[in-house]
Amino acid sequence: TQQSSRIDSSRHKTQQSSRIDSRHRATRTTSAATDADGPSKVAAAAAATAAAAAATLAATPPTKAFMDPLEDSFDFAAAERDFFPKPRTPKKERSRSSPAASPKAQTAVIPLSKFPPPRSSPVRRGKLKALVHEQISILFDDVASPPACRVSGAIFLQSSTHPKEHVYVIIRDPKAHLEQSECFGKAANDVKSKHDKYASEPFTEVVRVRLEHKEHLEGPIFCYRCSPRVRPIPLLLKTKVQHLEGICRVGVRIRANPGNKFALTQIAIIMVVPPDMIGETVSMSKKDGVWDGLKRTISWTLDSLAPSKTVEIRAQFEAAERERLQPSKFPVLIKCNAANIASGIEVSLDSMDQYSARSLDVRETSNVLYRKVD
Protein backbone atom coordinates (compact mmCIF):
# COMPACT_ATOMS: atom_id res chain seq x y z
CA THR A 1 0.00 0.00 0.00
CA GLN A 2 2.84 2.44 0.81
CA GLN A 3 4.63 1.60 -2.47
CA SER A 4 1.46 2.16 -4.51
CA SER A 5 0.93 5.47 -2.70
CA ARG A 6 4.51 6.61 -3.56
CA ILE A 7 4.04 5.60 -7.24
CA ASP A 8 0.76 7.53 -7.49
CA SER A 9 2.36 10.57 -5.81
CA SER A 10 5.32 10.62 -8.21
CA ARG A 11 3.02 10.16 -11.21
CA HIS A 12 0.84 13.05 -10.01
CA LYS A 13 3.87 15.32 -9.66
CA THR A 14 5.07 14.37 -13.15
CA GLN A 15 1.66 15.16 -14.62
CA GLN A 16 1.51 18.51 -12.86
CA SER A 17 5.00 19.50 -14.03
CA SER A 18 4.21 18.49 -17.63
CA ARG A 19 1.03 20.56 -17.62
CA ILE A 20 2.82 23.58 -16.18
CA ASP A 21 5.62 23.32 -18.80
CA SER A 22 3.09 23.04 -21.62
CA ARG A 23 1.26 26.14 -20.38
CA HIS A 24 4.51 28.11 -20.06
CA ARG A 25 5.54 27.13 -23.61
CA ALA A 26 2.10 28.08 -24.93
CA THR A 27 2.26 31.42 -23.14
CA ARG A 28 5.71 32.20 -24.50
CA THR A 29 4.59 31.23 -27.99
CA THR A 30 1.51 33.44 -27.74
CA SER A 31 3.45 36.44 -26.46
CA ALA A 32 6.08 36.03 -29.14
CA ALA A 33 3.46 35.79 -31.86
CA THR A 34 1.69 38.83 -30.49
CA ASP A 35 4.83 40.89 -30.50
CA ALA A 36 5.99 39.79 -33.94
CA ASP A 37 3.05 39.21 -36.21
CA GLY A 38 0.11 40.88 -34.54
CA PRO A 39 -3.46 39.69 -33.95
CA SER A 40 -3.56 37.07 -36.69
CA LYS A 41 -0.64 35.23 -35.21
CA VAL A 42 -2.19 35.50 -31.74
CA ALA A 43 -5.18 33.42 -32.81
CA ALA A 44 -2.92 30.83 -34.39
CA ALA A 45 -0.83 30.64 -31.25
CA ALA A 46 -3.94 30.20 -29.09
CA ALA A 47 -5.15 27.38 -31.30
CA ALA A 48 -1.74 25.74 -31.10
CA THR A 49 -1.82 26.07 -27.31
CA ALA A 50 -5.24 24.41 -27.07
CA ALA A 51 -4.12 21.59 -29.34
CA ALA A 52 -0.98 21.02 -27.25
CA ALA A 53 -3.02 20.98 -24.04
CA ALA A 54 -5.50 18.50 -25.52
CA ALA A 55 -2.68 16.25 -26.69
CA THR A 56 -1.06 16.40 -23.27
CA LEU A 57 -4.30 15.45 -21.52
CA ALA A 58 -4.98 12.66 -23.97
CA ALA A 59 -1.49 11.23 -23.49
CA THR A 60 -1.73 11.38 -19.69
CA PRO A 61 -3.38 8.22 -18.19
CA PRO A 62 -6.12 9.00 -15.66
CA THR A 63 -5.48 8.15 -12.02
CA LYS A 64 -7.74 5.76 -10.14
CA ALA A 65 -8.23 7.93 -7.07
CA PHE A 66 -9.27 11.30 -8.48
CA MET A 67 -9.96 13.34 -11.64
CA ASP A 68 -8.29 16.45 -13.04
CA PRO A 69 -7.42 18.89 -10.19
CA LEU A 70 -8.49 21.80 -12.35
CA GLU A 71 -12.07 20.55 -12.69
CA ASP A 72 -14.83 21.27 -10.18
CA SER A 73 -15.58 17.57 -9.60
CA PHE A 74 -12.22 16.87 -8.01
CA ASP A 75 -12.55 14.52 -4.99
CA PHE A 76 -10.34 16.05 -2.30
CA ALA A 77 -11.32 13.41 0.30
CA ALA A 78 -10.22 10.57 -1.99
CA ALA A 79 -6.97 12.33 -2.78
CA GLU A 80 -6.22 12.87 0.88
CA ARG A 81 -7.04 9.26 1.66
CA ASP A 82 -4.80 7.92 -1.13
CA PHE A 83 -1.84 10.28 -0.81
CA PHE A 84 -1.89 10.87 2.92
CA PRO A 85 -2.66 7.46 4.48
CA LYS A 86 -3.18 7.19 8.20
CA PRO A 87 -0.28 5.79 10.25
CA ARG A 88 -0.44 2.09 10.92
CA THR A 89 -1.42 1.05 14.43
CA PRO A 90 0.19 -1.86 16.34
CA LYS A 91 -1.35 -5.27 15.93
CA LYS A 92 -2.85 -5.44 19.42
CA GLU A 93 -4.43 -1.98 19.20
CA ARG A 94 -5.65 -2.62 15.65
CA SER A 95 -7.35 -5.88 16.70
CA ARG A 96 -9.14 -4.09 19.52
CA SER A 97 -10.09 -0.88 17.72
CA SER A 98 -10.89 -2.17 14.22
CA PRO A 99 -11.41 -5.95 14.10
CA ALA A 100 -12.67 -5.74 10.51
CA ALA A 101 -9.23 -4.52 9.31
CA SER A 102 -7.71 -8.00 9.48
CA PRO A 103 -8.02 -10.13 6.31
CA LYS A 104 -9.24 -13.14 8.31
CA ALA A 105 -12.07 -11.15 9.81
CA GLN A 106 -13.11 -9.93 6.36
CA THR A 107 -13.05 -13.35 4.75
CA ALA A 108 -14.60 -15.28 7.70
CA VAL A 109 -17.85 -16.99 6.80
CA ILE A 110 -20.34 -17.94 9.54
CA PRO A 111 -22.10 -21.25 8.75
CA LEU A 112 -25.86 -21.29 8.77
CA SER A 113 -25.87 -23.98 11.45
CA LYS A 114 -24.72 -21.37 13.98
CA PHE A 115 -27.93 -19.43 13.60
CA PRO A 116 -30.92 -20.73 15.62
CA PRO A 117 -33.93 -21.83 13.58
CA PRO A 118 -36.90 -19.49 13.52
CA ARG A 119 -39.54 -20.15 16.15
CA SER A 120 -43.17 -19.99 15.38
CA SER A 121 -44.22 -19.62 19.02
CA PRO A 122 -42.35 -18.36 22.13
CA VAL A 123 -40.71 -21.09 24.22
CA ARG A 124 -39.74 -20.36 27.80
CA ARG A 125 -36.75 -22.21 29.12
CA GLY A 126 -35.96 -22.83 32.77
CA LYS A 127 -34.99 -25.42 35.30
CA LEU A 128 -37.16 -26.86 38.02
CA LYS A 129 -36.04 -28.74 41.11
CA ALA A 130 -38.09 -31.56 42.61
CA LEU A 131 -37.50 -33.13 46.01
CA VAL A 132 -38.97 -36.53 46.85
CA HIS A 133 -38.78 -36.91 50.62
CA GLU A 134 -39.92 -39.99 52.56
CA GLN A 135 -40.33 -40.81 56.24
CA ILE A 136 -39.57 -44.42 57.22
CA SER A 137 -40.76 -45.48 60.67
CA ILE A 138 -39.74 -48.89 62.04
CA LEU A 139 -40.81 -50.24 65.44
CA PHE A 140 -39.47 -53.34 67.19
CA ASP A 141 -41.11 -54.36 70.45
CA ASP A 142 -42.16 -57.43 72.39
CA VAL A 143 -45.66 -57.42 70.90
CA ALA A 144 -45.13 -56.64 67.21
CA SER A 145 -43.51 -59.53 65.37
CA PRO A 146 -42.46 -58.96 62.60
CA PRO A 147 -41.65 -55.29 63.22
CA ALA A 148 -44.14 -52.62 62.24
CA CYS A 149 -43.05 -50.46 59.31
CA ARG A 150 -44.70 -47.44 57.70
CA VAL A 151 -43.47 -45.37 54.72
CA SER A 152 -44.98 -42.00 53.79
CA GLY A 153 -43.68 -39.32 51.45
CA ALA A 154 -44.20 -35.97 49.78
CA ILE A 155 -43.02 -34.23 46.60
CA PHE A 156 -41.82 -30.63 46.67
CA LEU A 157 -41.31 -28.43 43.61
CA GLN A 158 -39.06 -25.38 43.44
CA SER A 159 -38.59 -22.94 40.56
CA SER A 160 -35.85 -20.33 40.22
CA THR A 161 -38.25 -18.05 38.31
CA HIS A 162 -41.99 -17.67 38.73
CA PRO A 163 -43.53 -16.81 35.36
CA LYS A 164 -47.25 -16.92 34.78
CA GLU A 165 -47.36 -20.44 33.45
CA HIS A 166 -47.89 -24.03 34.56
CA VAL A 167 -46.15 -27.38 34.22
CA TYR A 168 -47.33 -30.97 34.29
CA VAL A 169 -45.63 -33.30 36.78
CA ILE A 170 -45.91 -37.00 35.95
CA ILE A 171 -45.68 -39.39 38.92
CA ARG A 172 -45.31 -43.07 38.07
CA ASP A 173 -45.46 -46.01 40.48
CA PRO A 174 -43.94 -48.93 38.54
CA LYS A 175 -43.82 -51.22 41.60
CA ALA A 176 -47.41 -50.45 42.70
CA HIS A 177 -46.28 -49.52 46.21
CA LEU A 178 -48.57 -46.54 46.75
CA GLU A 179 -51.64 -47.24 48.84
CA GLN A 180 -53.02 -43.70 49.10
CA SER A 181 -52.11 -40.43 47.36
CA GLU A 182 -53.53 -36.98 46.84
CA CYS A 183 -52.61 -33.55 45.50
CA PHE A 184 -51.74 -31.03 48.15
CA GLY A 185 -51.63 -27.24 48.18
CA LYS A 186 -53.20 -24.41 46.22
CA ALA A 187 -50.88 -24.68 43.22
CA ALA A 188 -51.48 -28.37 42.35
CA ASN A 189 -54.44 -30.05 40.67
CA ASP A 190 -55.05 -33.62 39.54
CA VAL A 191 -55.74 -33.55 35.78
CA LYS A 192 -55.16 -37.18 34.77
CA SER A 193 -58.79 -37.71 33.70
CA LYS A 194 -58.61 -34.74 31.30
CA HIS A 195 -55.80 -36.15 29.17
CA ASP A 196 -56.25 -39.29 27.11
CA LYS A 197 -52.52 -39.85 26.98
CA TYR A 198 -52.39 -40.90 30.65
CA ALA A 199 -56.02 -41.70 31.43
CA SER A 200 -55.57 -45.40 30.63
CA GLU A 201 -52.08 -45.75 32.10
CA PRO A 202 -52.18 -47.53 35.49
CA PHE A 203 -50.25 -46.39 38.56
CA THR A 204 -49.69 -42.94 37.07
CA GLU A 205 -50.71 -39.52 38.36
CA VAL A 206 -50.70 -36.22 36.44
CA VAL A 207 -50.44 -33.05 38.51
CA ARG A 208 -50.80 -29.60 36.99
CA VAL A 209 -48.72 -27.07 38.97
CA ARG A 210 -48.97 -23.30 38.65
CA LEU A 211 -45.70 -21.41 39.07
CA GLU A 212 -46.84 -17.80 39.33
CA HIS A 213 -47.08 -17.77 43.15
CA LYS A 214 -43.95 -18.58 45.13
CA GLU A 215 -45.82 -18.98 48.42
CA HIS A 216 -47.92 -21.77 46.89
CA LEU A 217 -44.77 -23.85 46.26
CA GLU A 218 -43.41 -23.67 49.80
CA GLY A 219 -45.36 -26.78 50.82
CA PRO A 220 -45.65 -30.18 49.08
CA ILE A 221 -47.63 -30.56 45.86
CA PHE A 222 -48.24 -34.31 46.24
CA CYS A 223 -48.45 -36.58 49.30
CA TYR A 224 -48.64 -40.38 49.45
CA ARG A 225 -48.44 -43.39 51.72
CA CYS A 226 -47.10 -46.83 50.87
CA SER A 227 -48.82 -50.13 51.51
CA PRO A 228 -47.79 -52.24 54.55
CA ARG A 229 -45.96 -54.70 52.33
CA VAL A 230 -43.25 -52.09 51.75
CA ARG A 231 -40.84 -52.96 54.55
CA PRO A 232 -37.40 -51.38 54.09
CA ILE A 233 -34.83 -52.23 56.76
CA PRO A 234 -31.88 -49.84 56.27
CA LEU A 235 -30.19 -50.94 59.51
CA LEU A 236 -30.24 -53.68 62.13
CA LEU A 237 -30.28 -53.00 65.87
CA LYS A 238 -29.58 -55.41 68.72
CA THR A 239 -29.53 -54.65 72.44
CA LYS A 240 -28.44 -56.77 75.39
CA VAL A 241 -29.07 -56.00 79.07
CA GLN A 242 -27.16 -57.78 81.86
CA HIS A 243 -28.00 -57.35 85.58
CA LEU A 244 -25.40 -57.95 88.28
CA GLU A 245 -25.34 -57.04 91.97
CA GLY A 246 -26.11 -53.34 91.98
CA ILE A 247 -24.84 -52.91 88.38
CA CYS A 248 -26.55 -53.02 85.01
CA ARG A 249 -24.64 -53.37 81.73
CA VAL A 250 -26.22 -52.47 78.39
CA GLY A 251 -24.79 -53.30 74.96
CA VAL A 252 -26.01 -51.79 71.67
CA ARG A 253 -24.95 -53.05 68.26
CA ILE A 254 -25.88 -51.22 65.05
CA ARG A 255 -25.17 -52.56 61.56
CA ALA A 256 -26.01 -50.92 58.24
CA ASN A 257 -27.83 -53.15 55.78
CA PRO A 258 -25.37 -54.52 53.18
CA GLY A 259 -28.04 -53.96 50.52
CA ASN A 260 -28.06 -50.18 51.00
CA LYS A 261 -27.04 -48.22 47.92
CA PHE A 262 -25.73 -45.27 49.92
CA ALA A 263 -24.24 -44.70 53.34
CA LEU A 264 -26.45 -43.57 56.22
CA THR A 265 -25.62 -40.05 57.36
CA GLN A 266 -26.27 -37.80 60.37
CA ILE A 267 -26.92 -40.70 62.72
CA ALA A 268 -28.25 -39.95 66.20
CA ILE A 269 -28.53 -42.73 68.83
CA ILE A 270 -30.69 -42.04 71.86
CA MET A 271 -31.02 -44.41 74.82
CA VAL A 272 -33.70 -43.92 77.48
CA VAL A 273 -32.53 -44.68 81.03
CA PRO A 274 -35.19 -46.06 83.43
CA PRO A 275 -35.82 -44.25 86.73
CA ASP A 276 -34.31 -47.03 88.85
CA MET A 277 -30.85 -46.42 87.33
CA ILE A 278 -28.41 -43.63 88.19
CA GLY A 279 -27.51 -41.87 85.00
CA GLU A 280 -25.10 -39.31 86.41
CA THR A 281 -22.47 -41.96 87.18
CA VAL A 282 -22.77 -43.87 83.89
CA SER A 283 -19.58 -45.15 82.25
CA MET A 284 -19.53 -45.52 78.45
CA SER A 285 -17.24 -47.19 75.96
CA LYS A 286 -17.89 -44.38 73.45
CA LYS A 287 -16.75 -41.20 75.19
CA ASP A 288 -18.80 -38.69 73.20
CA GLY A 289 -22.10 -39.67 74.82
CA VAL A 290 -24.16 -36.85 76.39
CA TRP A 291 -26.34 -37.37 79.47
CA ASP A 292 -29.58 -35.36 79.71
CA GLY A 293 -30.86 -35.43 83.29
CA LEU A 294 -34.18 -33.76 82.46
CA LYS A 295 -35.16 -36.29 79.78
CA ARG A 296 -33.09 -39.11 81.32
CA THR A 297 -31.47 -39.98 78.01
CA ILE A 298 -27.96 -40.60 76.70
CA SER A 299 -27.26 -39.61 73.09
CA TRP A 300 -24.44 -40.35 70.64
CA THR A 301 -23.85 -39.04 67.13
CA LEU A 302 -22.15 -40.52 64.07
CA ASP A 303 -21.30 -38.75 60.81
CA SER A 304 -21.96 -41.72 58.53
CA LEU A 305 -22.24 -45.49 58.43
CA ALA A 306 -21.33 -47.27 55.19
CA PRO A 307 -23.20 -50.43 54.07
CA SER A 308 -22.36 -53.55 56.14
CA LYS A 309 -20.42 -51.48 58.70
CA THR A 310 -21.01 -52.08 62.43
CA VAL A 311 -20.91 -49.85 65.52
CA GLU A 312 -20.98 -51.14 69.11
CA ILE A 313 -21.75 -49.08 72.21
CA ARG A 314 -21.58 -50.28 75.83
CA ALA A 315 -22.77 -48.50 78.96
CA GLN A 316 -22.73 -49.43 82.66
CA PHE A 317 -25.18 -48.03 85.25
CA GLU A 318 -25.48 -48.20 88.99
CA ALA A 319 -28.83 -49.36 90.29
CA ALA A 320 -30.72 -47.15 92.71
CA GLU A 321 -31.76 -50.29 94.62
CA ARG A 322 -29.26 -53.04 95.21
CA GLU A 323 -31.80 -55.82 95.37
CA ARG A 324 -33.84 -55.90 92.15
CA LEU A 325 -36.05 -58.73 90.96
CA GLN A 326 -37.24 -57.55 87.51
CA PRO A 327 -34.84 -56.52 84.71
CA SER A 328 -34.95 -52.95 83.47
CA LYS A 329 -35.76 -51.89 79.90
CA PHE A 330 -33.61 -49.50 77.90
CA PRO A 331 -35.50 -48.30 74.81
CA VAL A 332 -33.25 -47.20 71.95
CA LEU A 333 -34.14 -44.71 69.23
CA ILE A 334 -32.05 -44.16 66.07
CA LYS A 335 -32.50 -41.29 63.62
CA CYS A 336 -30.59 -41.04 60.36
CA ASN A 337 -30.80 -39.84 56.76
CA ALA A 338 -30.56 -41.78 53.51
CA ALA A 339 -30.03 -40.66 49.91
CA ASN A 340 -32.66 -42.92 48.38
CA ILE A 341 -36.36 -43.71 48.74
CA ALA A 342 -38.18 -46.96 49.47
CA SER A 343 -41.29 -46.46 47.34
CA GLY A 344 -39.48 -46.47 44.00
CA ILE A 345 -41.70 -43.81 42.39
CA GLU A 346 -40.52 -41.86 39.33
CA VAL A 347 -41.07 -38.12 38.85
CA SER A 348 -40.75 -36.36 35.49
CA LEU A 349 -42.16 -33.49 33.41
CA ASP A 350 -44.35 -33.65 30.34
CA SER A 351 -45.40 -30.85 28.02
CA MET A 352 -48.95 -30.47 26.83
CA ASP A 353 -48.65 -26.90 25.54
CA GLN A 354 -46.08 -24.49 24.10
CA TYR A 355 -44.07 -24.18 27.32
CA SER A 356 -42.08 -27.33 26.69
CA ALA A 357 -38.41 -26.50 27.15
CA ARG A 358 -38.08 -27.13 30.88
CA SER A 359 -35.83 -29.62 32.65
CA LEU A 360 -36.40 -31.25 36.03
CA ASP A 361 -33.71 -31.98 38.58
CA VAL A 362 -35.00 -34.69 40.95
CA ARG A 363 -33.39 -35.35 44.34
CA GLU A 364 -34.39 -38.19 46.67
CA THR A 365 -33.99 -38.21 50.44
CA SER A 366 -35.48 -40.09 53.37
CA ASN A 367 -35.48 -39.91 57.16
CA VAL A 368 -35.29 -43.18 59.08
CA LEU A 369 -36.79 -43.47 62.55
CA TYR A 370 -35.88 -46.80 64.15
CA ARG A 371 -37.24 -47.67 67.61
CA LYS A 372 -36.63 -50.77 69.67
CA VAL A 373 -38.30 -51.49 73.01
CA ASP A 374 -37.64 -54.83 74.70
Image (cartoon, rainbow, N blue to C red):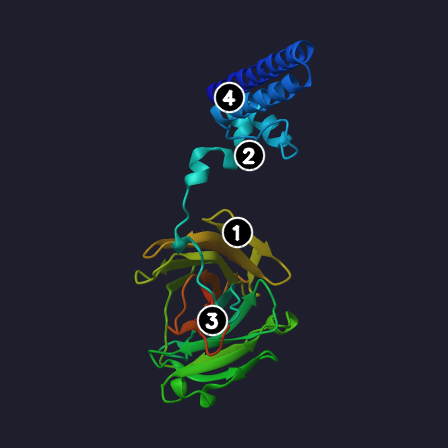
Residue visible at 51% across and 19% down in the picture:
11
List the residue tagged with mark 1. Answer: 289
Quarter of the view holding residue 76: top right
Q: Give how far apart the Cα atoms at labels 3 and 4 are.
A: 65 Å
List the residue tagged with mark 4. Answer: 8
List the residue tagged with mark 3. Answer: 356
Most foreground residue, 3 or 35: 35
Residue visible at 45% across and 75% down in the picture:
351
Height in image: 90 above or below 111? above
4 or 1: tag closer to the N-terminus = 4
3 or 4: tag closer to the N-terminus = 4
Q: Give how far apart the Cα atoms at labels 4 and 2 are.
A: 26 Å
- The kind of residue tagged 4 is Asp
4 or 2: tag closer to the N-terminus = 4
Most foreground residue, 314 or 334: 334
Quarter of the view holding residue 68: top right
Q: On residue 98, which mark appears?
A: 2
Per the image, label 3 sits on a secondary structure element best described as loop
Q: Give how far apart the Cα atoms at labels 4 and 1 are.
A: 98 Å
Q: Residues within 10 Å of mark 3 (few under 14, many from 20)?
A: some
